[in-house]
């Protein structure tokens, strides 16, 4: 039972570390909250979902999620900018959602096809 809660604890620790780091930079409570949430959404979430396809331990996946997520989202945003699409908050949030959902959908499809 406890081994199933391990990824949730790791995500909570990542959020706590991000919140502590954001506390040193942010001046107000609202900017602190938005900065810690932005770090989680931009770096961690897409990278973690992309790394679900690899056979990694949870700790390794959490550590490598930051550079992989930052690289994947930045690369997609770079190519969108090359094609003339304006980089707004909605565009960045949309790219993060698309990368995360597409990665999880491909993993789900792979798991369903391997179960047959």
Image: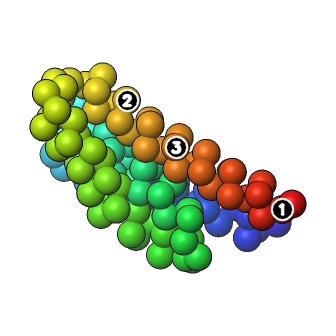
- Identify the residue at horizontal 51%, vertical 54% (top origin): 49
In the image, which is nearer the foreground, mark 3 or mark 2?
Answer: 3
x then y, percent, for residue 81 = 15, 35
Nearer to me, 104 or 34: 104
Residue 115, horizontal then vertical, whole percent: 84, 62
Residue 38 vs 16, above or below: the answer is above
**Neighbours of disc 2 within 10 Å: few (<14), some (14-19), many (20+):** few
**Quadrant where the image shows the N terminus:** bottom right
The reply to whether callout 3 and callout 2 are in contact (CB within 8 Å) is no
Lower sequence index among marks 1 and 3: 3
Query: In terms of secondary structure, where does tag 1 sit?
Result: helix
Q: Nearer the viewer, residue 43 or 105?
A: 105
Residue wearing tag 3: 102
Say if 66 sits above or below 78 in the image.
Answer: below
33 or 71, which is in the foreground? 71
Query: Callout 1: few (<14), some (14-19), or many (20+) C-alpha neighbours within 10 Å?
Result: few
Give the percent coordinates (x, y) of residue 66. Answer: 34, 61
Mark carried by residue 94: 2
**Residue 72 seen in the current view:** yes
Q: Which mark is residue 70?
A: none
Q: CA distance from mark 3 to mark 2?
A: 12 Å
- How many callouts does the rendering have? 3
């Amino acid at each position: 039972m406890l081994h199933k809660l391990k990824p949730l604890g790791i995500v909570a620790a990542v959020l706590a570390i991000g919140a502590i780091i954001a506390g040193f930079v942010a001046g107000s409570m609202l900017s602190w909250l938005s900065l810690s949430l932005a770090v989680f959404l931009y770096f961690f979430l897409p990278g973690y979902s992309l790394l679900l396809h690899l056979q990694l331990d949870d700790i390794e996946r959490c550590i490598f999620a930051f550079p992989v997520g930052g690289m994947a989202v930045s690369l997609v945003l770079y190519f969108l900018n090359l094609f003339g699409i304006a980089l707004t908050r909605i565009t960045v949030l949309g790219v993060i959602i698309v990368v995360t959902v597409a990665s999880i959908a491909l993993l789900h499809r792979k798991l369903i096809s391997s179960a047959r």
